[in-house]
Image (tube, rainbow, N blue to C red):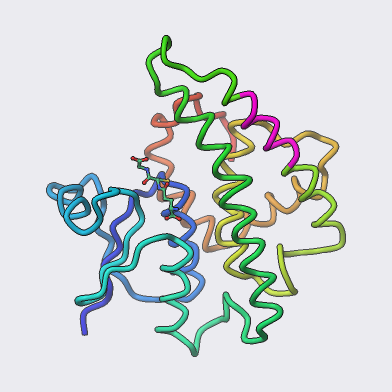
Amino acid sequence: MPPPRLYAHPFSSYCQKVLVALYELDAPFEYRHLESPGAMDELARLWPMKRFPLLQDGERTVIESTCIIEYLQQRHPDRPHLIPDDPDMALEVRQLDRFFDNYMSTPQQKIVFDQLRPTDRRDGHGVEEARAMLDTSYRWLEQRMAGRTWAAGDAFSLADCGAAPFLFYADWTHPIPAACANVRAYRARLLARPSMIRAVDEARPYRQYFPLGAPDRD
Ligand SMILES: N[C@@H](CCC(=O)N[C@@H](CS)C(=O)NCC(=O)O)C(=O)O
């Protein structure tokens, strides 16, 4: 069987979430870079929402970063367990995965995508709400991470796969306050993880795409 094909762009946070999981699992895959000729058209045929990443494995199409990671874990049960076997622990990991998608990435993307709108079509109120949500998320995560290394349980998990790119870009978008020392330390720990170092390095050539201007760090 040929390896599954991942439709992805290195600068995309949701793609990095899956790439971190692939590197953690050391799982083989074919990288279908979305800037390659024809790749976007293929993606649109497979998934009319045209959101990425998407995994194609033979006849099977897997959408949504979390589901792709769950699928990869099923295919590689002998590799590190990004979703714990214990159902209670697995539930906690999934809760944190939802937290990072819904309350860290969603407001971060709102701010970035607003910047891409024509100036007379911007949504200032929505951006203010998004910034307020990021502030609340940082504060909640600050308490959560006290005395913890990873987001849920003792081991690096699905939740950390998302946390890594989302905190990476959230800090560029709406800086993590100095008062949130646990969140800052967690972000630094995630960025020092070899799987994330690789994902960040692969995305380096595209930093000029960041609409708010990428800071000269990380
Ligand atoms: N819920 C989706 C979100 C995927 C997503 O928003 N991907 C962005 C790239 S980071 C995208 O497809 N952007 C293209 C667009 O918005 O048109 C997932 O978890 O995979």
Magenta residues, dominant SS class: helix
Q: Residue at x 54, y 42 (%)?
A: 106
Q: Looking at the image, is 67 positioned above or below residue 134?
A: below
Q: Looking at the image, is 120 positioned above or below residue 124?
A: above
Q: Residue at x 70, y 31 (%)?
A: 132
- Residue 5 position by quadrant: bottom left
Q: Is residue 203 magenta?
A: no
Judge by depth and name the residue closer to the eye, 128 or 54. 128
Q: Looking at the image, is 143 positioned above or below residue 85?
A: above
Judge by depth and name the residue closer to the eye, 46 or 204. 46
Return the x and y of residue 26 as percentages of the image width and height: 44, 75
Left/right of residue 48 with respect to residue 195 in the rendered view? left
Return the x and y of residue 23 as percentages of the image width and height: 46, 68
- Residue 172 position by quadrant: top right
Judge by depth and name the residue closer to the eye, 101 or 31. 101
Q: Residue at x 73, y 53 (%)?
A: 186
Q: Over which residues does the magenta segment extend? A: 128-136
| Quadrant housing the N terminus | bottom left
Q: Is residue 134 magenta?
A: yes
Judge by depth and name the residue closer to the eye, 171 or 70. 70
| Quadrant housing the C terminus | top right
Q: Residue furthest bottom?
A: 78
Return the x and y of residue 24 as percentages of the image width and height: 51, 71
